[in-house]
Amino acid sequence: MDTEEHHQSHPDPNIAYHFDWEFRRESAIWVDQQALAPNFHPLAMEFHQWLLRQGQFSVLAENHKGTAFSLTNPYAYSASAIAAILARSINASHEFTHATEELDATEADIERIRIYNEQVLYMARFCEATIKQLLYCTQIPKKYYEHAALGSLLASDCKECRKSGKPPHKNSMLGSLAHRYKLCLEFDQCLIEHLKIVNRRRNLEAAHSDTQALNIRSATESRAQLEHDTLKVGNEFVHMLEHISDLEIEMRKEIKSRIRYHFESSLSTTVEAQVPENEMSS
């Protein structure tokens, strides 16, 4: 955690503080003693481009684990499966809202509820998995994120300080990742927007949301309602993806730079070891 902030005698309980962190060995794919590539799938970036119709996203299956040069980051595979399901749901939404065939009014509104609920739940899970995938590459202890839902990744109470009787405050896992690249300010400013995704999921899972209610009306009206709701939650999702995508880009850039430096350093050492001593001194 930031040393100066962490040791404030009276931390602001409304501010989510950040951990300082370093990469760990698992941030790269290794073959023997050589690091080859970053050990995460830039899925937020790919999915964001797919949503904007500017590219495709790749899917990793369990069958890919253990193959040559495969990722060992477990969250990459869960995030990939979630992405595939979410994409199917988004496509289903488009097909349903733009269809023209007659539908029974009850069946139409049931379909609206089903598709909307899928999107809300899987958007939150997608964000969770892609954030955890990045956290896995760091030395931040797993206990802070392994079982955390999206809300806790954005801001959660510091249990250690609370247990020891110190002034209460919050920690942010997403903010901690962003802090290294000086992106945390814009993340923190968007926290309320990001929490909308969290609250929508909570409402659905607690059966509090009005969208859970069956509203018997024409199929045209149900389609229009789904299009409106999907656009609203979709814009929130795209906003968060932009932030996670920025982190993926920065982390990949830094890991690749470290791999390149390590390779060049080891190559230089090898070359020097092969040069005769008299040439080394000339």
Image (cartoon, rainbow, N blue to C red):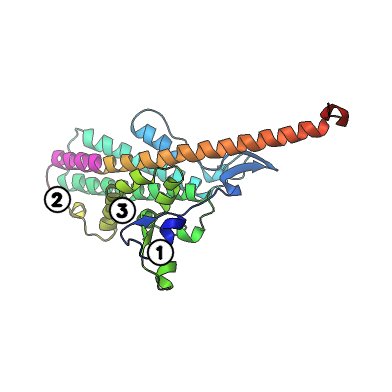
Question: Closest to the observer: 145 or 55?
Answer: 145
Q: Earlier in the sequence, mark 1 or mark 2?
A: 1
The answer to whether residue 23 is left or right of residue 161 is: right
Residue ID for mark 2:
215
Q: Is residue 261 visible?
A: yes
Asked whether the residues under the numbered discs 1 and 2 touch, taking CB atoms below 8 Å apart as contact, a structural biologist would say: no
Label 3: which secondary element: helix
On residue 198, the disc is: 3
* Crowding at mark 3 (Cα within 10 Å: few <14, some 14-19, many 20+): many
Hey, what amino acid is under mark 3?
A: Val
Residue 123: percent from the left, percent from the top? 34, 46
52 in the magenta segment: no
Residue at numbered disc 1: 158
Amino acid found under the numbered disc labelled 2: Asn
CA–CA distance between discs 2 and 3? 24 Å
Examine the rendering and report whether any part of residue 130 can be seen. no
Q: Quadrant of the C terminus?
A: top right
Residue 237 vertical position relative to residue 167 in the rendered view, above or below: above
- SS for callout 2: loop
- Closer to the chain start, of discs 2 and 3, is 3
Q: Position of residue 276 (x, y in %)?
A: 86, 29
Marks 3 and 1, Cα distance to the nearest angstrom?
19 Å
Where's residue 15, x and y in %? 33, 57
